Image (cartoon, grey):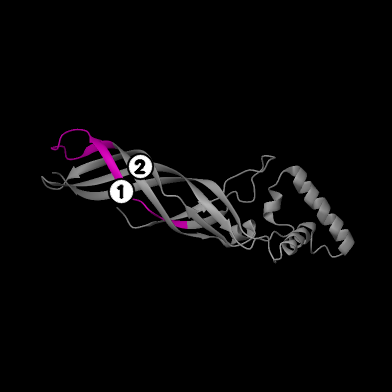
Amino acid sequence: LAKPLSIKLYGEGKRPDGTPNSLNGKELLTTKMLPPLVIGSYNFGTPKWPVRPYVGLGVMYAVFFDAKTTAFFDEYQGGKTTVSTRNTFGAGPFVGLQSPITDDWHVNVSVGQIGLRTTSRLVTSNTAIQSGADVLKDLTPNLVNAIQAGDELVKNQVGTGLDGATTLLTELVARNKGQDNLGSFVREQKVRINNTIINISIGRSF
């Protein structure tokens, strides 16, 4: 058992043309994880050895809570986004050393890795996408070109170019819905978390 861990999640992805997308390498959110962990091990040698190496398998049940998105991610999504992540199991290998303190007590030092795969549910409220937004740059090349052409057309008509075609279209859709934004959008995203766990503990043999 341990106190909750703080986790930072970063984006990783590519555009259809293979270049990194706008989320790639950017911090998207922070969350906390309660990590109950059980390690089963096989010890080499005998209890009389001053130091006994061991190998083992760790199993973790990850409980996620208190997720907070970054300002960059909210801007990318087009509105304030809340995230909830499903609790999940993970397993991975451990290696360590055990040394006796007395006949009954011993100290352990181990290191291991546990990979976690889960799904997060994202809800963006009061969504509004503006012209020039990073999310528009991550669409297929044909859509990107069409949006750029639309922005140039609006720029030539309006003169200032401050309000591109995307801004004007989203405002039109919002008005048609009788509100000042595009509403709420819900989607799910698969998440991969890699943990390297260093453990120092004191145990008692029964």
Q: Left or right of 110: which side holds 67?
A: right
Q: Residues within 10 Å of mark 1 (few under 14, many from 20)?
A: few
Q: In which quarter of the image is residue 114?
A: top left
Where is mark 1, residue-wise?
A: 199
In the image, 186 versus 61, the foreground residue is: 186
Q: Where is residue 6 in the image (x, y as percent from the top left)?
A: 42, 57
Predominant secondary structure, magenta span: strand
Q: Say left or right for 120 vs 36.
A: right
Label 1 element class: strand
Q: Which residue is drawn at 12% across and 47% down?
A: 102
Relative image position of residue 15 (x, y in whole percent): 66, 43
Q: Residues within 10 Å of mark 2 (few under 14, many from 20)?
A: many
Are the two marked residues, 1 and 2, in contact with CB atoms closer than 8 angstroms?
yes
Residue 19: x and y in percent read 67, 42
Q: Which residue is nearer to you in this view: 11 or 178?
A: 178
Q: Is residue 36 magenta?
A: yes
Magenta-highlighted residues:
31-55
The spot of residue 7 in percent (x, y) is 45, 54
**Hey, which quadrant is residue 184 in on the image?**
bottom right
**Residue placed most toward the observer, 188 or 35:** 188
Compute the Cα span from label 1 to label 2: 8 Å
Residue 51 position (above or below residue 85): above
Can you say which quadrant of the picture contains the C terminus? top left
Residue at 64% x, 45% y is: 20
Marking on residue 169? none
Question: Going 18% across and 33% down the picture, which residue do you hit?
Answer: 45
Residue that lies at the very extreme toward the top in this rendered image? 45
Mark 2 element type: strand
The residue to which callout 2 is attached is 112
Splitting the image into 4 quarters, where does residue 32 fall?
bottom left
Residue 175 placement, left or right of 113: right
